[in-house]
Amino acid sequence: MNLPIASAAAQVVRGACPHDCPDTCALKITVEHGRVTRVQGDPDHPPTHGALCTKVSRYPERTYHDERVLRPLKRIGPKGSGQFAPVGWDEALTDIAARLQAIAARDPQAIVPYSYAGTMGMLQGESIAARFFHTLGASLLDRTICASAGGDALAATYGGKLGMHLEHFVDSKLILIWGSNSITSNLHFWTFAQQAKRNGAKLICIDPRRTETADKCHQHIALLPGTDGALALGLMHELIVNGWLDEDYIARHVDGFDLLREKALAWPPERTAQVCGIEAEVVRTLAREYATTRPAAIRLNYGMQRVRGGGNAVRLIAMLPCLIGAWKQRGGGLLLSASGWLKAHKNSAALERPDLLGDRRPRTINMSTIGDDLQRESSPEFGPRIEALIVYNSNPVAVAPQSPKVVEGFKREDLFTVVLEHFLTDTADHADYVLPATTQLEHLDVHGSYGHTYVLLNQPAVAPLGEAKPNTQIFRELAAHMGLAEPCLRDSDEQLAEQALIGVDMAALREQGWFKLPVPELPFADGGFPTPNGKVIVNAPGHGVPDFVPNYEAALSSPELAERYPLAMISPPARHFLNSSFVNVKSLRAVEGEPLVEMHPADAASRGIADGALVRVFNDRGSYRCKAALNDRARPGVVNGLGVWWRKLGRDGTNVNELTSQRLTDIGRAPTFYDCLVEVEAA
Ligand SMILES: Nc1nc2c(c(=O)[nH]1)N[C@H]1C(S)=C(S)[C@@H](COP(=O)(O)OP(=O)(O)OC[C@H]3O[C@@H](n4cnc5c(=O)[nH]c(N)nc54)[C@H](O)[C@@H]3O)O[C@H]1N2
Ligand SMILES: Nc1nc2c(c(=O)[nH]1)N[C@H]1C(S)=C(S)[C@@H](COP(=O)(O)OP(=O)(O)OC[C@H]3O[C@@H](n4cnc5c(=O)[nH]c(N)nc54)[C@H](O)[C@@H]3O)O[C@H]1N2
Ligand SMILES: [Mo]
């Protein structure tokens, strides 16, 4: 592969945004005198259309940040203190290799990789890293922290994580923006939605929080957190009793609808409204508009599945477009994730080489319960106590639920922790070794997307800064220091890029920087779901018929808890951060100000809390101090703790995950970040 490393002359290099976002933008990176001076969106890439979010247009500020980790660091203070001394690469890798070898000799499953989507790249994500851990026979990681409730639910319904083309939303006449703050977290979808709006479409936002997206929609339905399944059943009730079903589409393409009909008939608008905390008339009107407007689309997003019943709710909502035959038209249907379209084109087996495990079947650790799992002793059920953690592309001390437990685990003196990072994050502060990783501007990668149907190539724009190395190179060198002879551990990034994709014109990808996958225009217009019989599944094996599942923590299911902690807390993304990334970029942190909890003025008044007052948000798991912002972005009974701050940049070294629980969703073993009761008092 051709790698245009910058020379003195100004040049433009094609790249891709690596972040965990549905938009995966195509970038044009200007390099002058060996330094990136500008990052812009590619005007020719249809989803990006030349625009970038504020965060990524400031990418050079992140890459050239004066706090970048640019040399390997070895811990010299107590765990968590962030006290390190620089060491040479060879010294660091020799010591790490010896430590891991000693553990692996007892049981390689005591070594746990911990990674997520800090970069979504196929190379710098799971390629050499996966090969390395598979060769060792280390524990496997269940990557559940974000999307597995909704993702598994969607796959249980449609047969894959499949949905509408992003570009088709311009043709919609009604768009339900459901559990998504698009302006914050899916900006490039929002552009298409606005175009639809200009063409006469009605936009309805379904979200407990009055977000900036809700402000710009025609209507906002502020339901209680975790009640989306009830709303979907209420809508189905109305579709059924008013004769608004597409009987023909259902007969031909939905398997088991009668089972669902029975459930839905138990949800008249009054019951639905009571559970959701909204008016019955809102349910009736929404059902009528959804049934009678064509084309009708749903942009569902992962915000609504971070609760106990998140999987069931996604299954119910995913039925709606099938009941009205919305899939028959361009601009109709649903999009939660488009990543299933990539599946046929991403050669995961070649990149990750699970065959290197041979006959070994290591145990799997769920990343969402790392707090508890770090405390477990060896046992026949659990397997060996976790002795080593290798963290890359993730900041679990900040982002994993119930952080008091996570911190306690990372502080264990008998745990050996290596963190590959750009910065000294809350997690890196707990490492025995921090290894400096390159950013997207410094390495090669290949990307798909979960919000559109293109693949992208990211060419390195500049040479690695300082002594930083790509994740791939770090794992190659670590493997060599451990004497692992497996030849595929030596594949170069260029070779990996050649192995990554199937059925993609690599010449076009190199030339243009992006390539549209061959996805059918109207994939489900005439059924054809990738399920065993081609039909949408109601009664899913192992899951049964979908139903409303109330939150763990709600008056409905735990009245005693709700008496002590009467406020439901959600912790959705802050616009200028990306999970915990960018919190340390000063210009972006300045816009967000400081950690806040939004409260409705009525909830604040009864607690004697003034706007801007310092408050303590607490429950049985922990306590978090921040400022109260009183406004109607919060509905009564719900508080919004905007996420996810670095703990050490928060007020008392905590963030919102001090309060969240490690309980898991109904489907997908995912965290329930937004299923969390709290109380708030003036601090
Ligand atoms: N700027 C920015 N962009 C991001 C991210 C970020 O942190 N910052 N995160 C990225 C990631 S990791 C992901 S997974 C994606 C998608 O990330 P999502 O988590 O889907 O992000 P949003 O769409 O911002 O937020 C979800 C919305 O759901 C709402 N919500 C919370 N609980 C409920 C509920 O029970 N029901 C309903 N209907 N709504 C609820 C929240 O108020 C919020 O407005 O976005 C990505 N994009
Ligand atoms: N309370 C609450 N908690 C949440 C959420 C919420 O809404 N509320 N959202 C959840 C969601 S949706 C998600 S996806 C998770 C996300 O959690 P994480 O995947 O941990 O995401 P980030 O916090 O962005 O941390 C990613 C880290 O990877 C690093 N990184 C980026 N690129 C590279 C690279 O090329 N190499 C290496 N070695 N490192 C790199 C970054 O510097 C950053 O520190 O958080 C979850 N946590
Ligand atoms: Mo996510």
Image (tube, rainbow, N blue to C red):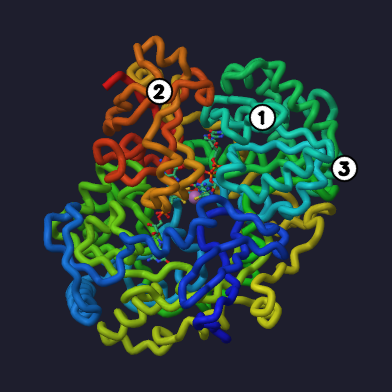
Quarter-of-image position of residue 539:
top right
Hey, which residue is sitting farthest top in the picture?
Answer: 606
472 left or right of 161 in image? left
Q: Which residue is drawn at 67% across and 48% down?
A: 189
- Give me the C-alpha separation between circle 3 and circle 2: 42 Å
Quarter of the image where one finds residue 254: top right
Circle nearer the viewer, 1 or 3: 1
Image location of residue 674, percent across then percent down = 45, 35
What kind of element bears circle 1? helix
> Percent x, y for residue 623?
27, 31
- Residue on which the image places disc 2: 558
Examine the rendered structure and indicate whether residue 673 appears above or below residue 2.
above
Q: Is mark 2 within 8 Å of ligand 1?
A: no
Amino acid under disc 2: Ser
Amino acid identity at mark 1: Leu
Mark 1 or mark 3: whose residue is earlier in sequence:
1
